[in-house]
Image (cartoon, rainbow, N blue to C red):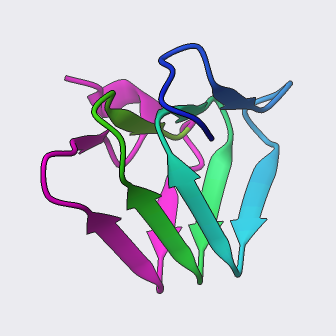
Amino acid sequence: MSNNANNFILGSAASNTLTNQELIQGSGSIQTLGIVNGGTLLANQSTPLLILPSTAGLNNTGTLNVATGSTMKSAPRAAEHW
């Protein structure tokens, strides 16, 4: 994803699941779906990368990485957004 807050990876229902085994990088929002990360989620832009899973939550067995000067914000479940 580019350096744009309007980048989205969205689920059409809370029961949808994104399974990542590779690299998702950039900025924007991954939201409204369960997230299973076995790869890398990398925030590497000046605009934050927001990880906002549905109530299905975030299951991370991979890597959450933030490059210098970048920001990642996450909440484990939709009900726990800041």
* Residue furthest top in the image: 6
| x and y percentages locating residue 25 in the rendered image | 54, 56
Residue at position x 40%, y 34% in the image:
50
Q: Please tell me which residue lies in front, 29 or 75.
A: 29
User: Disc count in the image?
Assistant: 0
Residue 18: x and y in percent read 75, 56
Viewer-side residue, 29 vs 77: 29
Residue 46 is left or right of residue 45, and the answer is left
Horizontal and vertical percent position of residue 79: 37, 27
Determine which quarter of the picture holds residue 77: top left
Q: Quadrant of residue 36?
A: bottom right
30 is within the stretch colored magenta: no
In this rendered view, identify the residue nearer to me: 78 or 61.
61
In this picture, residue 8 sits left or right of residue 2? right
Residue in front for this viewpoint, 78 or 41: 41
Q: Is residue 54 above or below residue 39?
A: above
Say if 34 sits above or below 54 in the image: below
Q: Quadrant of residue 19?
A: bottom right
Which quadrant is the N terminus positioned in? Answer: top right
The reply, left or right, for residue 47 in relation to residue 33 is: left
The reply to whether the magenta stretch includes residue 67 is yes
Query: Which quadrant would the C terminus be assigned to in this image?
Result: top left
Residue drawn at (69%, 79%) of the image: 22
Rendered residue at 70%/70% (across/down): 20
Residue at 47% across, 84% down: 62
> Residue reaching furthest left?
69
Q: Position of 22 compared to 63: left or right? A: right
For the magenta stretch, what is the residue range? 54-82
Where does the image place residue 7, in percent across and percent down from the top left? 63, 24
